Image (spheres, rainbow, N blue to C red):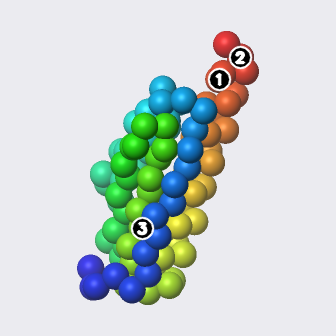
């Protein structure tokens, strides 16, 4: 990948560390095997805060990665909330 011109640290804080860890664990495989190498994405966990870092060489690549990972994150959160409601 070329040098990053566009980057973002997206921080999402959860109610507790267990929930943050579950979301992190669900998203980690997607980061480990990205569908494209046009951008670089990494995730980390800091207590109850999930940090998603996106680096891209251009705005188009950045936007594609941002949209993909925020959609995945939202789907995982929705599923987690549904499962909690049924418990």
Q: Distance between the residues labelled 1 and 3?
A: 29 Å
Residue position for label 3: 54
Q: In which quarter of the image is residue 87?
A: top right
Most foreground residue, 44 or 30: 44
Residue position for label 1: 83
Q: Quadrant of residue 53?
A: bottom left
| Rendering coords of residue 47 (x, y %) | 43, 37
Name above or below for residue 17 compared with residue 58: above
Neighbourhood count class around disc 1 (C-alpha, 10 Å): few under 14, some 14–19, many 20 upward: few
Report if the CB atoms under discs 2 and 1 are less than 8 Å apart.
yes
Residue position for label 2: 86
Q: Is mark 1 on a helix, strand or loop?
A: helix
Residue at position x 30%, y 51% in the image: 32
Label count reads 3
| Rendering coords of residue 80 (x, y %) | 61, 31
Neighbourhood count class around disc 3 (C-alpha, 10 Å): few under 14, some 14–19, many 20 upward: many
Q: Earlier in the sequence, mark 1 or mark 3?
A: 3
Q: Earlier in the sequence, mark 2 or mark 3?
A: 3
């Amino acid at each position: 990948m070329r040098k990053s011109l566009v980057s973002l640290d997206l921080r999402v804080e959860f109610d507790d560390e267990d929930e943050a860890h579950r979301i992190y664990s669900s998203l980690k495989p997607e980061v480990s095997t990205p569908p494209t190498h046009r951008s670089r994405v990494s995730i980390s966990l800091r207590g109850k805060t999930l940090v998603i870092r996106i680096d891209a060489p251009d705005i188009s690549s950045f936007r594609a990665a941002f949209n993909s990972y925020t959609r995945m994150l939202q789907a995982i959160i929705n599923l987690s909330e549904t499962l909690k409601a049924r418990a």
